[in-house]
Amino acid sequence: MDHYYQLTYSVKPRAEDGELAAQRVRKAMKEDSAWDSLRDIETTVVSVLTLDEKTEDEKREEAKKLISERIKDIMESSEAYHDVDVYASLMVDQLGPHIEFKV
């Protein structure tokens, strides 16, 4: 079943000299083709997830896993996986309160 979602995030360097890595990840997340960027809101993206699980709790975990994996891929392709943390809040249509997590 398809679910609309909104992801807001903050990319934080793990050390003072990690700001360039954080900028690379921010840019890559904003430009990722899997997401639609909002023109005037810099760290929010929207899209649709297809979730296969049955219960609401299972779907919430599946959504978190899918988005976390995508963020991890972006961090790795930006050569910043060990240099930054991404803090995220995910709202998924029909799945209750926001899901907060860190990658």
Image: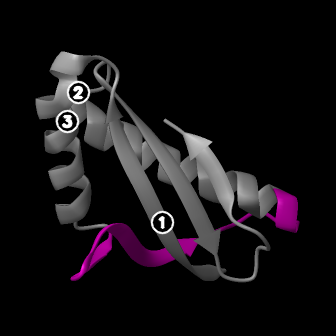
Q: Nearer the viewer, mark 2 or mark 3?
A: 2
| 8 relative to 90 in the view: left or right | left
Q: Does dot 2 land on a helix, a strand or a loop?
A: loop
In the rendered view, tell whether residue 23 sits above or below residue 2: above
Neighbourhood count class around disc 3 (C-alpha, 10 Å): few under 14, some 14–19, many 20 upward: few
Under mark 2, the amino acid is Ala
Q: Earlier in the sequence, mark 1 or mark 2?
A: 1
What residue appears at the point 16 percent right and 18 percent down from the top-left corner? Answer: 17
Q: Does dot 1 land on a helix, a strand or a loop?
A: strand
| 55 relative to 49 in the view: left or right | right
Under mark 3, the amino acid is Ser
If the image is split into quadrants, where does the N terminus sit? bottom right
Is residue 79 among the parts visible in the rendering?
no
In magenta segment, residue 56: yes
Residue 89 in the image: state x and y as whole percent.
Answer: 56, 58
Q: CA distance from mark 1 to mark 3?
A: 20 Å
Q: Are marks 2 and 3 in contact (CB under 8 Å)?
A: no
In magenta segment, residue 62: no
The residue labelled by disc 2 is 80
Q: CA distance from mark 2 to mark 3?
A: 8 Å
Q: Which residues are magenta?
A: 35-57
Residue 53 in the image: state x and y as whole percent.
Answer: 77, 62
Q: Earlier in the sequence, mark 1 or mark 3?
A: 1
What residue appears at the point 69 percent right and 65 percent down from the top-left corner? Answer: 98
The residue labelled by disc 3 is 77
